[in-house]
C-alpha cells in the first residue's frame, strides 16, 4: 500500500520544495507569483512570507497515514475506483460519487480523480489552503521558524477538523505513523 503511494507523495513534495526555493530566491516571475496567490486564495497585498506558510510540504508520513486511515488501506470503493484515498468531499452536483450512506438532506459527494497524482495534488492543496487546517500550517511555520523538523506526527496535531471525530482522529493518525514507522520517510524530502 505505502509503496504505491510513496513515489508520488515524494515527487509532489519535491516540486513544492523547488517552488518554495524559487520564491525565496526571487527566481519566479511576477505573473507566476500572482497566479500562486490566487491558487492559494491569498490577497494581492499579502506578503511572500505569508504565501510560503501555505506553499510547503506535507510530511510523507502524514500523507501515508491519512491515506491508510481514510481509504481503509486502499480497500474503499473510492480509493479503488476513483483514486480518492483521503475521503475528500466536493459540493457541486456531479463533481464526484454519491456515498451509499449519505445522510438525508446532505448534498456532498465524494470527490473522484482521474489519477493518483491528481488526487494527491488536490489533497495537498486542500491541506495547504483550506481554513480548517490553519492550525496545521501554524504548527509547520513555527517548526520552520524555530528550525525544528517538520514531521507528520507533529503536524497531525493540526488535523482536528479533518474528521467529525475531532481529536480522536489526530491520535489515530499518529498511531498509524508510529506503528508503521512512517516517520522514516519524513527526512527523505
Image (cartoon, rainbow, N blue to C red):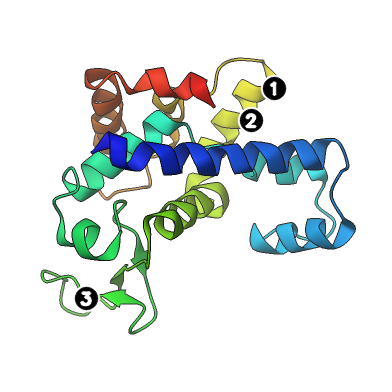
* CB contact under 8 Å: marks 2 and 1: yes
- Residue at image location 63% in from the left, 45% down from the top: 54
Residue 51 in view (yes/no): yes
> Looking at this view, is 133 or 177 the one in front?
177
Spot the residue most to the bottom: 93
- Graded by Cα atoms within 10 Å as few (under 14), some (14 to 19) or many (20 or more), the crowding at tag 1 reads few
Mark 1, residue position: 145
Q: Secondary structure at mark 1?
A: helix
Mark 3 and mark 2: span between their CA atoms? 36 Å
* The quarter of the displayed image where residue 84 is located: bottom left
Mark 3, residue position: 98
Residue 88 placement, left or right of 154: left
> Looking at this view, is 10 or 52 the one in front?
10
Mark 2 and mark 1: span between their CA atoms? 6 Å
x, y percentage for residue 14? 58, 37
Answer above or below: position of 33 versus 11: below
x, y percentage for residue 134? 54, 44
Q: Which quadrant of the figure contains the N terminus? A: top left
Q: Nearer the viewer, mark 3 or mark 2?
A: 3
> Looking at this view, is 100 or 134 the one in front?
100
* CB contact under 8 Å: marks 3 and 1: no
Mark 2, residue position: 141
* The quarter of the displayed image where residue 3 is located: top left
The answer to which of marks 3 and 1 sits earlier in the sequence is 3
Q: Nearer the viewer, mark 3 or mark 1?
A: 3
- Residue at image location 28% in from the left, 32% down from the top: 173
Mark 3 and mark 1: span between their CA atoms? 42 Å
The answer to which of marks 3 and 2 sits earlier in the sequence is 3
Amino acid at each position: 500500500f505505502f509503496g504505491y503511494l510513496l513515489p508520488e507523495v515524494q515527487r509532489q513534495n519535491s516540486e513544492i520544495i523547488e517552488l518554495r526555493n524559487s520564491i525565496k530566491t526571487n527566481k519566479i516571475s511576477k505573473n507566476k507569483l500572482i497566479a500562486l496567490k490566487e491558487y492559494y486564495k491569498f490577497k494581492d497585498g499579502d506578503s511572500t512570507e505569508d504565501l510560503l506558510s501555505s506553499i510547503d510540504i506535507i510530511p510523507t508520513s502524514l500523507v501515508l497515514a491519512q491515506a491508510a486511515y481514510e481509504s481503509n488501506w486502499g480497500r474503499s470503493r473510492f480509493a479503488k475506483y476513483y483514486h480518492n484515498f483521503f475521503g475528500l468531499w466536493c459540493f457541486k452536483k456531479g463533481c464526484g460519487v454519491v456515498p451509499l450512506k449519505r445522510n438525508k438532506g446532505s448534498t456532498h459527494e465524494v470527490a473522484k480523480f482521474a489519477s493518483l497524482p491528481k488526487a494527491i495534488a488536490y489533497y495537498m492543496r486542500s491541506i495547504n489552503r483550506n481554513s480548517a487546517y490553519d492550525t496545521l500550517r501554524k504548527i509547520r511555520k513555527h517548526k520552520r521558524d524555530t528550525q525544528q523538523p517538520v514531521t507528520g506526527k507533529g503536524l497531525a496535531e493540526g488535523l482536528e477538523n479533518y474528521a467529525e471525530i475531532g481529536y480522536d482522529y489526530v491520535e489515530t493518525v499518529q498511531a498509524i505513523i508510529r506503528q508503521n514507522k512512517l516517520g522514516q520517510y519524513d527526512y527523505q524530502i
